[in-house]
Image (spheres, rainbow, N blue to C red):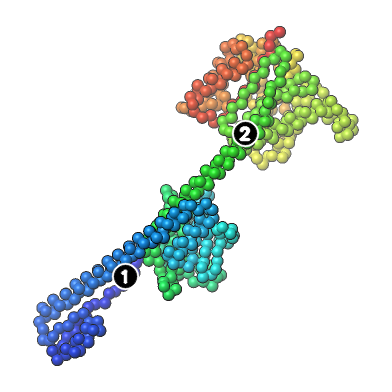
Amino acid sequence: MLRYTAVPLPSPIIVFGTIEDADQLAAAIAHGASDYLILPTADRLLVTRLQLSLDRQHSEQQAAWYLHAFNEMEKLADDLRLKILPLGIALSVTHDFDQLLAQIVTEAMAICNADVGTLYLRTEDDRLEVAIFRAQSLGLAYGGPDNTAVPFPPLSLRNDADRPDLRHVATYVANLGETVNVADVYNANEPFDFTATHRFDVEYSYRTISSLTVPLRNHHVIGVLQLLNAQDERGSVIPFDAYHQLVAESLASQATIVLHNHILTQRHEELLGYQREMEIARQLQADFLPADLPSVPGWDLTTLLEPARMVSGDFYDIIPLSDGKLCLVLADVCGKGLAAALFMALVRSILRAFMMQHHLLHAQRVLATAAFHGQRPFTDDEKSLLSNTILLTNEYIGRNHAQTHMFATLFCGILNPETGELVYVNAGHNPPLLLTPHGIQTELPPTGPALGLRINVLHQVRQAQLAAGDTLLAYTDGITDARSPDRAPFTHARLRALLNAPFATTAELVQRIMAAVNTHVDGLGRYDDITLLAARRLSQ
């Protein structure tokens, strides 16, 4: 906003005299009188001459104003052609972001002949942070290529009532996208808070007078450029005039485009880096899964994991135990993305560690003798092994990672391939299904809460029997919760309906389920990971 002050113009002066006063009348004209009249004269002539003088003065003033405006426009055109446009080109080829910011400020100060320049950048949490500060007469330079720390705190764009904060000039400009031009901050009519400016003046023995604050706006305000104390040719501080404002706004427009493009490029590079990191994380996570399923005589095993994103919170594991048995694991970590994937890696690692610890002690009693004085920490039966493994895993998560507020549902069973006996724990997971050749026989319901929800919990261990031709099917809720374009879930009912028809192999069963899910979502991106584990006891 511009503030104009009306300046009264001098009235025309008409001098009177007789013919004998010709010399004095001529001298009066030479000293600034507008016109003269020879007495005696008529009143009508006096009025006419006075009107002519007023009209002439008005014409001269208009001519002077147009000349000034023309000169200003010509100067602006020259500055645009010779300074601002070349500056835009120079800024566009500057690859150093800090150098770019500093160049915007120093060039704006030079074009507007300002003593102080500040560039604020808008942050993602809706604050204005000082990126560059320059004070020529004080020799101060904060921010920029030399990474000098900026001593000024950021300004919040929202007040305590979560409304736009309009108290400070910079926040006003950032919130409303309007230029503010103040002739004297100590005698301003605007209701702005200049406390920080006054404090700066006291600390540095400075005197801030004029202020010009311009938004850097593309589709929205991304920053604010503030200039202080414009100076004339003699070095005296003057208000920023309309020309200064036009130049500063033109420069801000140029800078905004370059700055916006630079920020977009930065974010694109960050995104590419993030994608590379996620690809590495995806590969690392894939390495957590069994590279190959064990070949177990008399059994048909199939697994599948399809992440909704690049990394998954689901996992499965098939752990061959030293006595020929198999540990079958399928789990679903709450949450999505990288956090869930990291928590998955934690759960999988400590579960395997506690499971294998038992069998290491079973094979080599050296550790047991040293640590437990000859007493085994676990008994040799599968139920105790499973109970203790789940107990230790849950205790570790609950006592060391409760602050993450994450948990995992898990099905873990130990299968005896020779007998088809399965002992299992279901920690809050979707009930796996036992299938006969004729359809669903039973469910394996939860035997305790999800891992990580509570400590000091002993999960029950239960037992199931797979006869020849029976199949164990475990799955995560990415199957049943898969959404169609109209947001309808796939549901347990649809899944169960698929299981009534016979299938030749577990791979065929898994493919049938996935085909039905993909048809249901109809090309819509999946929100949750999908994991399946199927184990079928072949007929003798």
Q: Quadrant of residue 467?
A: top right
Determine whether, in the image, residue 492 is placed left or right of residue 416.
Answer: left
Q: Secondary structure at mark 2?
A: helix
Disc sitting over residue 317 in the figure? none
Q: Is residue 394 above or below residue 167?
A: above
Determine whether, in the image, residue 81 is placed left or right of residue 258.
Answer: left
Type of amino acid under label 1: Ala
Residue at left 27%, top 74%?
9
Q: Which residue is mark 1?
A: 6
Among all residues in the image, which is located at the extreme bottom?
A: 20
Q: Quadrant of residue 362?
A: top right
Q: Is residue 65 above or below residue 459?
A: below
Select label 1 or label 2 by which is in front: 2
Q: Which residue is mark 2?
A: 282
- Residue 42 image point, x, y percent: 10, 82
Q: How many marks?
A: 2
Relative depth, front residue between 462 and 37:
37
Among all residues in the image, which is located at the extreme top?
A: 540
Can I make out residue 36 in this image?
yes
